[in-house]
Image (spheres, rainbow, N blue to C red):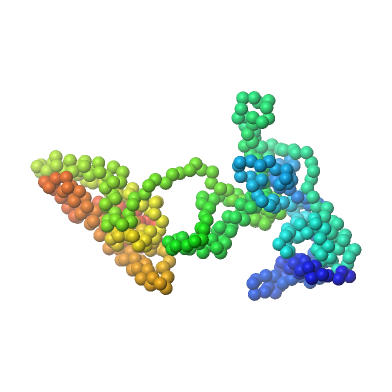
Amino acid sequence: MNELTDRAKVFRAAIASFVGKKLEKKPKDENDNFAAATEFECEDWLSKAIKNVPRLYTATHILKATHTKATGNNLHVSASNMVVREEIGTHSLGNIDEDIIASSAAYLGASSFLRAEAEGRRFLDWIRRGDTDFRAALHPDISKSEEWMATLQRITYKDEPPATHPMAKQVYWLIGEEPQDDTQYHLLQPMFSSPLTHAVHADIQNVRFGEVNKAARQVFHERKPSNDIYCDYRNLAVRKLGGTKPQNISQLNSERTGINYLLPSLPPTWKPRGPHLLKRKSVFEEFIWFGDVRDQVKALADYLESVQDKTTNMKIRNERDALVNELVESLTAFSLAIRAYYSAGWTRDEHCRLPRCEQLWLDSERAELPLRDDPNRPEWREDDATFREDYDHGEWADEVAGRFGLWLNDQLRKRSDALMALGEAAMRHFARKVILDVAWPIPLQRHAKVDAT
């Protein structure tokens, strides 16, 4: 019998915990972890798994990840043999996490064991070091533990000449003038780097679900000051490898449940300068400088001046309405530009001076945000609750339409006191519908409720 050291007991406990998880042994503890396996259960599971180790081998670049029917060779490239390039790649990783592959997924039971951890390192690392405490923890019998350790140490990579396959899609593109010179080709489809993919996946998962970033995300959305760094990955796509059996690709792919994130490869889009609405008393102070609004107002003023001595008829009304409609369309584009530029809740900023009706129009998604709950600023929660009530009440749309009419008439009078003012009813008719239509992100029942007023 092995007389275990304290360190070997730590390894034995880690092995028992791992096997218990694999067996889904009940009962679970208060942290929802499975119970540790018994000595007999560990011996039974390990004996079956370790006998398949000779059928396993390590790799860093997996051919099946490109296409499941590719029959070329996988690659195992160590950090010391990698060429350092300017581009981000496997060489950029500080620690290359080897993947484990088998000719059949039925042999992969031992691969998860090799990747389990104790004392901050993988079991595979302790095995390669020939750690005597880990060897003693494998089995109570010394001869059996030495036999298993020797079997586990035989896992290695296939040292074969590189061989590709048409399904690997490794297309080379000539970028120079000499097709005979291999250095003048660019590889369009590099081999799939499992360690790099796994590192990217781990970072994205931490950003999406890690407690630190979740707290930073909440602070960011609430527009509160913070010294924490908030990270975000946007426009991700997911490529599933292996279908319902991700273990058919590799062990790391199985640990990711086949999920492989793809970063956006779109050309950059530059966000134009948005309207500056903070400290403004009305959005219409900024609207006059938006797009062709000044020219449209001038065109309307010129037309009204040209017909002011004529009897109003259907033709004049239609031409006037067409000019006003151009302004209303600009109002639609203006409101959409504000929504694209500002995040929901921007009117909570202490520098926002806009009338409440304009806030409700241009920041309607704020009504869907959680109420702010700050013991030092109880008025914030009351203001958010009032914002929701005002939005539901629905009078803001008429108020904004009326303000638009007053603003347009004021613009006309600035150009000539002789110009006839457009009627308030006409302005409401033109502006109210577009104001409501632009508030599309709010649920339809609220939209209907406002329309009914």
Tell me what residue is drawn at x 56 percent, y 64 percent.
211
Tell me what residue is drawn at x 62 percent, y 37 percent.
188
Q: How many labels does the image show?
A: 0
Q: Quadrant of residue 189?
A: top right
Q: Is residue 48 visible?
A: no
Depth order, front residue of 71/414: 414
With 287 as the anchor, is 39 left or right in this view? Answer: right
Depth order, front residue of 218/237: 218
Above or below — where is 310 with respect to 145?
A: above
Quarter in which the C terminus is drawn? bottom left
Q: In which quarter of the image is residue 452?
A: bottom left
Tell me what residue is drawn at x 22 percent, y 52 percent.
407
Tell me what residue is drawn at x 33 percent, y 56 percent.
278
Task: Estimate the x, y position of residue 42 in percent, counting from the top left.
Answer: 80, 67
With 54 as the anchor, is 441 left or right in this view? Answer: left
Above or below — where is 206 with respect to 89?
A: below
Depth order, front residue of 193/332: 193
Which residue is at the far front? 227
Q: Quadrant of residue 169?
A: top right
Which residue is at the far right? 143
With 181 as the anchor, is 209 left or right in this view? Answer: left
Task: Estimate the x, y position of residue 235 in percent, counting from the top left.
Answer: 51, 50
Quarter in which the N terminus is drawn? bottom right
Q: Is residue 159 visible?
A: yes
Task: Estimate the x, y position of residue 99 in percent, counting from the top left.
Answer: 72, 51
Depth order, front residue of 16/390: 16
With 109 as the anchor, is 329 left or right in this view? Answer: left
Task: Estimate the x, y position of residue 178 in percent, counting from the top left.
Answer: 64, 24
